[in-house]
Image (cartoon, grey):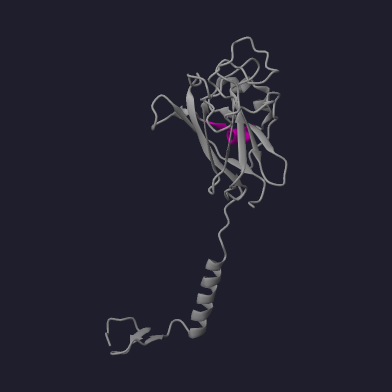
Amino acid sequence: WNPDWPADVKIRVGTTESIMTALTRRQFLQGATGLLAAHAVPLMAAPQALTPRQPEGPFYPVELPLDNDNDLTRVEGQPEPATGEITDLAGHILDRNGRALSGLRIEIWQCDINGRYRHPRDRGERPADPGFQGFGHTVTDSDGRYRFRTIRPAPYTGRTPHIHVAVYPAGTAPFITQLYVAGEPRNAEDFLYQRIPEAQRPLITTGFRPSQATPGNLTAAWDIVLGVTPA
């Protein structure tokens, strides 16, 4: 017995038995049960805002390129890579609860540095860049990640720089949108960009920043959030 111990705590010398006078057995069991129940309830992430849809546009490829991959900056048989600011574009495809959507096909297509699409309806006067593939696809991994090597999008008459994007969830229609460049002055006058409510524009806009890993190149990170359930 130690006279300095509080009066409501007593320990018998030579044993590990404790006598609790401030907390009855019933109170203890009730508290423990409540604590366990609280930890048994999973914490749900706050729902994420869905990525806005946008039109497909008129220049989805009529015929896919033979080297149909996720590197748009190289074309088989062409000695020179694409002209433009080479960009590593990567991100995740998620559901509204932040869970990864794996195994989804994602496609991108865009004009080259001269504003030309690889499409027969493109009547642009400037020559097309033979080193730019113009279209690419990949499939998300187990963490919902995707990655493309492309160029910073270029403008053409009537449109701000943008990249077209299509995602193909199983059992539902393709999700189609467009990605824009943060800080691009032409965004303020682009009719499709302005259709998106101002509060939602950050969901389809991202920065194209200098790469730390590859000097001279750019990087862009962009997550897509869909209103679907993981398979």
Q: Residue at x 60, y 10 (%)?
A: 126
**Magenta span: chief secondary structure:** helix
Q: Quadrant of residue 186?
A: top right
Q: Assess whether residue 61 is covered by the magenta stretch.
A: no
Residue projecting furthest to the front: 77
Q: Nearer the viewer, residue 171 or 178?
A: 171
Instruction: Give the vertical position of 8 relative to 123 (above or below).
Output: below
Can I make out residue 199 in this image? no
Residue 50, percent from left and from top: 64, 42
| Residues in magenta, as a range | 198-206
Residue 58, position as x, y percentages in the image: 71, 24
Q: Quadrant of residue 202?
A: top right
Camera-side residue of 135 and 188: 135
Count up the numbered dots: 0
- Image side of residue 18 versus residue 189, left or right: left
Residue 126 in sight from this viewpoint? yes
Placement of 103 over or under 70, stated as above or below: below
Can you say whether 25 is above or below 128 in the image?
A: below
- Residue 118, position in %: x, y? 63, 21
Q: Could you say which is closer to the camera, residue 159 or residue 34? A: 159
Q: Quadrant of the N terminus?
A: bottom left
Question: In the rendered view, does 81 fall on the left or right side of 102?
Answer: left
Question: Does residue 14 appear to the left or right of 126 in the view shown?
Answer: left
Is 17 situated above or below 216? below
- At which x and y percent is residue 204? 60, 33
